[in-house]
Image (cartoon, rainbow, N blue to C red):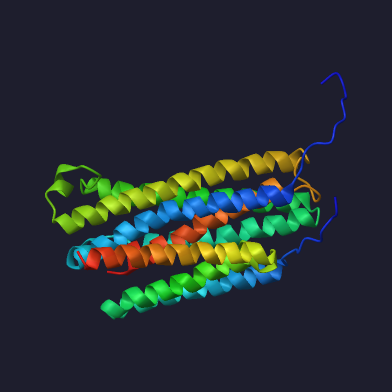
Amino acid sequence: MSQNLSHDEHYDPEGAKYGMWIFIFTELFLFGGLFLVYAVFRAKYSEDFHHAAAQLDTFIGTLNTVILLVSSMTAAMSLTAIQKADYKKAIALVSFTIILALGFMVNKYFEWGHKFEYKIWPGSPVLENMEKGDLLFYGLYFMMTGLHALHVLVGMVLLAICIVKIKKRKINEEKFVLLENSALYWHLVDFIWIFLFPLLYLVT
Amino acid sequence: MEKEKHHISSYTSLAIVLISLLFLTFLSVFVATLHFSTFSVGVALIIASIKGTAVLTYFMHLKYEKRYLQLIVAGIFIVYAVVIVITFIDYLLR
């Protein structure tokens, strides 16, 4: 910019954070609705759900849980680093969070790929011929993990934006609400997975 | 604008929370191998709830937020619990 207009930029971290929380509430109800559908159909077709859930790979599920928990911690730590004005550490921690998120997506790719090998995907002929409960379980499995994976991708983009902004010092020890909100979003992704994991992978 | 002091979580405290979360994860995987049948859903959900609460409290920093945000978050989960109960009453009495 040629002109150096100085004006007070509107900055309201408190308001921004409460806005983020309200958004998180809507997200909780989005997934909450799916959990409710799962609960009712599980009550109705418990045998089929048991059988179908046993087909999921507990190892990959557990690995992805560990990945998300660690990444959630590094996201929280990045906030500590930025408040201590330790930019290098903050960038390293956010980058590490994104790498872990990428690891999660790679696992998801192999996990879904494995299902596709057995010709199981939403609307596939093999799935259509299964018991009604199995069909519902896999429908919910793909919907819930798919929607969750979409959130992982969005989280990665948000965190990447944060890295750029930290580099430009637009996020600094005084103004860090964007990083705070991105971290909150990332914890939400972790929070939802904490419930998805036992319901889909463990309760067999 | 008045400047409020923002609580900074220490690296150590966050690491301790992570270790507890990992422990609970492996515990819930272990419990699942015991096949408690109907019990296992309950146990898995109780462990998940403890983990979820830890994430909300420490990672999402709710412990150090203002009282009314804490109350709103608690309220949201109460509303959700009510929705579950109402749905199941509807389903079971059909």
Q: Residue at x 75, y 44 (%)?
A: A171
In the drawing, does residue A123 fall left or right of residue A9? left
Q: Residue at x 43, y 75 (%)?
A: B46
Where A1 falls versus A196 (above or below)?
A: above
Viewer-proximal residue among B6 and A141: B6
In the drawing, does residue A82 fall left or right of residue A116? right
**Residue A76, percent from left and from top:** 65, 59
Q: Give the residue furthest to the top.
A: A2
Viewer-proximal residue among A187 and B10: A187
Viewer-proximal residue among A140 and A108: A140
Q: Residue at x 76, y 43 (%)?
A: A11
**Residue A122, percent from left and from top:** 25, 44
**Residue A39, percent from left and from top:** 30, 63
**Residue A119, percent from left and from top:** 20, 45
Looking at the rendering, in which quadrant would you find the C terminus of chain A?
Answer: bottom left
Looking at the rendering, in which quadrant would you find the N terminus of chain A?
Answer: top right
